[in-house]
Amino acid sequence: MFKRMLIANRGEIAVRILRACRELDIDPVVVYSQADKDSLAVQLAEHSWCIGPARAQDSYLNQDALLTVAKATGCEAVHPGYGFLSENADFADACAREDLVFVGPSGDVMRAMGNKAAARELMQQAGVPVVPGSEGGVATAAEAARVADAIGYPVLIKAAAGGGGRGMRRVFDPAQLEQLFEEARAEARACFGDDEMYLEKLVLNPRHIEFQIIADTQGNIVHLGERDCSVQRRSQKMVEESPSHALDQDLRQRMAVSAVAAARAAGYVNAGTIEFVLDPSGAYYFIEMNTRIQVEHPVTEMVSGIDLVREQIRIAQGLPLSVTQEQVELRGHAIECRINAEDPARGFAPSPGHVGLVHMPSGCGVRTDSLLYSGCELSPYYDSLAAKVIVHAPTRLQAIRRMRRALEEFTVQGPATTVDVLHQIMYHPQFVRGSYNTSFLDQNLDELLAWSSYGKEA
Ligand code: ADP
Ligand code: ADP
Ligand code: MG
């Protein structure tokens, strides 16, 4: 096993990776920006190194600084977490050049899947259904209009380099296509430094269903079932669960076969996620592959009993998967709620600052992955994810009840958070029935907000 590993990330995922390292007897090296000098990861680490100022460009995205620390501290491997450099093919290549094992797929595989327009073509060739859309990218608004006329409105304009729900626009009215195309392109350029755009048919009221796969260097690929991530605001996930209420055994099996075929076609190695949209008729379409550990990975860990970060590190070491497909047993039901330091009443605006008392829920079947501690500071420089509450129970209804009580216990003084809205979601009839889709949150937000503030005014 590796002796020492660099954790090239921050926040709750840095803590998550640190824990996996310790359990494997790997010495973790934590890096931090000046804004994160008192972070939980730094406090838990024996070795921590400052890599620059708060701005991500100057710290967590500074490849030279990361590689310098990795080499200077004698690391053999680098875990990129999610976000930041985790899907940066050049960084994976740079690690390889420095003789550091990048815990993830190769740069070439990342490049192939990282361009979402190109990934669609690869998936089509592999027989994986994709949403009707453009063949490759569309260079101009005029070309987008031609494709949209051919596939029919409504359409979704997407950025080939997209992520985090950015660089996307829905178009219902042909008269608005040009303006929305230019808007999406400007956002893509600003967020990703890449303005290649493509087009998909907009699937109405879909569920977001994704499959977790793990693949080793010996060519074994195993799937660990699905996650339903349809509770989204601004195309970003807020609640995830496994299994999905929308799949029967037959559909689950067909989607799993597609997910494994997708990973095989990509030549994929390490942990990855194949994302699909499922339309109300039961047709499903590949939308993208995430070539990294995902925020919501604990949901799968709870139902499968498999530690995905441990698995990632073992794979990077060249070891075979610790399970065969036949040995995978998915048990019970798991739900994750993402606690963001955001104010839902102000359009989910970030709410950084000083945190007073923190109390994290625990007890039977409850897990919290978090960066919070009493007295910590939430930096305005980074993503607003502060904690994830994950519950596991024998049935879906028991899991929902467990999540309600866990969220009731969750205390964080200071910043506004999404806790109360999440709590209300756990009572909403559509959620409880399991009959929600990706429009659920937008359609019900006013009602959820009204209920979550009920009795709290003056
Ligand atoms: P996942 O599919 O792993 O749940 P998301 O799609 O929610 O991930 O986010 C993907 C990545 O984008 C994450 O690494 C996250 O840090 C980042 N991200 C999430 N929300 C935002 C945002 N509002 N702006 C920029 N990046 C974001
Ligand atoms: P990102 O890289 O930002 O995660 P995705 O391609 O995964 O982008 O899309 C983000 C979300 O947008 C999905 O989870 C889904 O809810 C919605 N979405 C994406 N493609 C479509 C589509 N063709 N039709 C309907 N909804 C879609
Ligand atoms: Mg996605």
Image: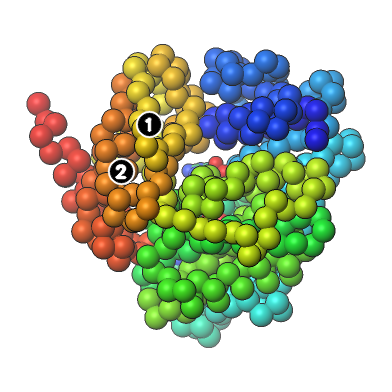
Q: Quadrant of residue 82?
A: top right
330 or 260, which is in the foreground? 330
The label on residue 49 is none
Question: As drawn, is 72 to the left or to the right of 351?
Answer: right
Horizontal side of residue 75 vs 88, given as left or right: right
* Quadrant hosting residue 247: bottom left
The amino acid on which the numbered mark 2 sits, given as a three-letter code, is: Arg
Q: Quadrant of residue 125?
A: bottom right
Residue 336 image point, x, y percent: 41, 46
Q: Is residue 196 visible?
A: no
**In the image as oriented, which residue stretches furthest toward the front?**
327
Q: Is residue 127 above or below residue 435?
A: below
Quadrant position of the C terminus in the picture:
top left
Residue at 40 percent of width and 16 percent of height:
374
In the rendered view, would you say 18 is above or below 234?
above
Looking at the image, which residue is at 44% across and 36% down? 367
**Which residue in the structure is indicated by mark 1?**
362
Q: Earlier in the sequence, mark 1 or mark 2?
A: 1
- The color scheme shown is rainbow
Across and down, in percent, residue 170 comes to 43, 66
Q: Residues within 10 Å of mark 1 (few under 14, many from 20)?
A: some
Residue 283 seen from this side:
yes
Which three-letter amino acid code belongs to the residue tagged 1?
Answer: Ser
Q: Which mark is residue 402?
A: 2
